[in-house]
Amino acid sequence: MKKMMRVCGGLAVTLGLVLAAGCTSSPQPTPGSSGVKPSGEVVLWDYYGESTPLKDIVAKFSAEHPEITVKYEAYAYDAISQKFPVAASSAAAPDLATIDMTWIPQYASAGLLADLGSFSGGTLNGQPMQSAYSAGAYSAMQYDGHLVTAMMDFDAYALYYRQDLLQAAGLSVPKTFDDFVDVSAKLAKGEGSKRTQAVLMPPSVFHFAGALAREGGQMLSPDNTKATFNSAEGVQALTNQKRLLDAGGLYWGPDAGDYIAGIADGRVAMFIDGPYMMGVLKSGAADQKGKWGVATTPYSKQPGSYLGGTGLVIPTGARNGTAAWVLAQYILQPENQELLYTKSGAAPATLAGLARPALTEPDPYFGGQTPFAVFKDAMATAVAFPNTSAWAEISKSLNTAVESVYLGKATPADALNTAAQESDAALNG
Amino acid sequence: MPLSTASPASVGTLTMRPHRRRRSLVGLVLVAPVLLVVGVFFYVPAALSLYWSFTKYNGNTPPQFVGLKNYAFVLTDPQTLNAFGHTVVFALLSMTVGPLLGLVSALLLNLPIRGRVWFRNAFFLPVVMPLVVAGTIWKMLLADNGLINQLLGVVGLDHQWLTDPGTALYAIIATSVWQGFGFETVVFLSALQSIPFELYEAARCDGANSWHQFWAVTLPALRPTMVFVFVVGVIGAFQAYDQVYVMTQGGPLRSTETIVFLLVERFHELKLGPASAIAYLLVAVLATLSALQLRLGKEKA
């Protein structure tokens, strides 16, 4: 019996030690350690979807860097927003990931994002990081004085329109907001959810932010302690959106899925979105080649859009951050930034990428127009979301506010005031 | 091998005690692996979560103790109270309609009708379907341009079942009832078939008609089964998440947010303190409800 107890006790201790060892993370290689060429496996998470250029870039990278094995994992945009914070705070973090720039404050404030300065030494492909980007982009890449992301693409909105339908109806491309309402009312057929040839109206904070910018409003106070989107300008912006929806819009709820379906089957004739939709249109509505055009979003006071984009981040829990930075730099090389545009229609974020020749070429899908020029203009007047860790909650409150107005359950003023109360609590909580 | 309890020392039992002690220790050793797994994967996380409920913690930086602040926030936060309200409605409706449908189906299947095996399988088939699959199917059926609206549109009764905040929650409840009442059917059917036939004979001899027999014989005999169905069903209803996630993501206008959906949202927002507080409040509510139901269901034979 005593012998049996000793054996069982030994087994229990051994099992406990094995479990404890399994719970600890393996030591990380020191970032930037000299004399050690980065190698090993790099796990890359990508939310770009079907039109992603990263698969092609990873294939080229693997041929040129056989010492680094890239394990590519694709996730839907919504899925990665839920998986990333959980994985990054556990032992399951990827080494490199594409994330929305609007998520940066929340993740950075939680300590999930590594300081890229420790991997980069302040340079990007041999060039000082600060001179590789515009001032606005470089600023957006920082949180609390640390460089937490390297921007891969930028996102600013413009108007996509079916030029063939407008021409058939004898209508011009709208330039002012009143034109926009008038054109949408004349172009759309049917009512409510059964409308076709309509303006796509998703109840999203991205579209509200653009409308707010076009009315000259601000999201938050300069010190990010108080919501100001419920100002007169904010109420006017949301009133305008509701007016557009009623005149000729098609409500596209959060559970309605990707709106390429509505574009492909003709329910949508106009929508406001970013340059990445060029790639989505080409792959999801290939039969509509030559029928689409791009123009500045119509406005009544001033041009404006939200400014966002995709950033490459290395989580603090990454196992192979040094090799991940090698891959990140490769992705941000000018020729690969150009691939971002030609493959997925996304706008390169680096200055060298923006200067590539493909961005100035006419696009046959858009009837020979050079669509990127429109987005470049939009970027000049675009406004980034406030850099606050409470942005995720503010964004949800605003989404609910816009949704309630679109569904006719609240007035713009009431909806925005409710969202402002919730946002103030989040900012000061 | 049952563990022995210590017996008073006596000359007669002194020679037995080492043997009993050996048996109890062997029993402990044999269950130790399971206890270790349960401890590591259940009790330790539960204890950690309880601790986190008293802290401000994002899962990465060290937790900061904040006392009862998270509980105070959760109990006064309008969004949390709304989600709790939706959950109560979900539980009340699904645990009224579901067991009722289950009982009626079981009574019908208990009759000597042709094809009852086929009907029994048909009722049970949705139960073996994952809620995610059931939710996806019904989301397509209830979509604005879905099959149900196409049929109802013929008579002008189409509606935005999932995009109208007034009907979205009930659409999800209907989906849950459709998916789950087959389980209640099978449970009630099994209980019905175990009721002694002599009880019905005796009732008939006393002049009871079908309704009297149902009220005086069937229902009392089904009482323990009903308690089981309600306890399990209420616990399940309070944990509603899959169908909400798949069908509406808590919308429109947060009208379908349930307490577990909100808990998971808080987790994704890296607010582990409030998320843990919600979890433990839910445990307290379910424990109270279960104890209440078991007490109400107790009846001396």
Image (cartoon, grey):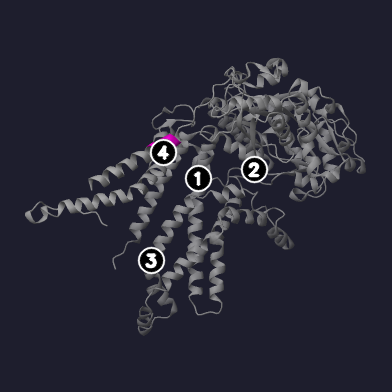
| Furthest residue in direction left, as rendered | B11
The residue singled out by tag 2 in the image is A409
For residue B43, side relative to residue A110 (left or right): left
Q: Which mark is residue B223?
A: 3
In the image, the segment drawn in magenta is: A17-22
The residue type indicated by label 1 comes to: Val
The residue singled out by tag 4 in the image is A19
Q: Nearer the viewer, mark 1 or mark 3?
A: 1
For residue B89, side relative to residue A383 (left or right): left
The residue singled out by tag 1 in the image is B260
x and y percentages locating residue B47 in the rendered image:
38, 39
Assign a secondary structure to mark 1. Answer: helix
Is tag 1's residue or tag 3's residue first in the polypeptide sequence? Answer: 3
Label 4 neighbour load within 10 Å: few <14, some 14-19, many 20+: few
Task: Specify the subunit that label 3 lies on.
Answer: B
- Distance Cα–Cα, label 3 vs label 4: 46 Å
Label 3 neighbour load within 10 Å: few <14, some 14-19, many 20+: some
Q: Can residue A300 be seen by looking at this rendering?
A: no
C-beta proximity under 8 Å, tags 2 and 1: no
Q: Nearer the viewer, mark 1 or mark 4?
A: 4
Magenta: predominant secondary structure element? helix
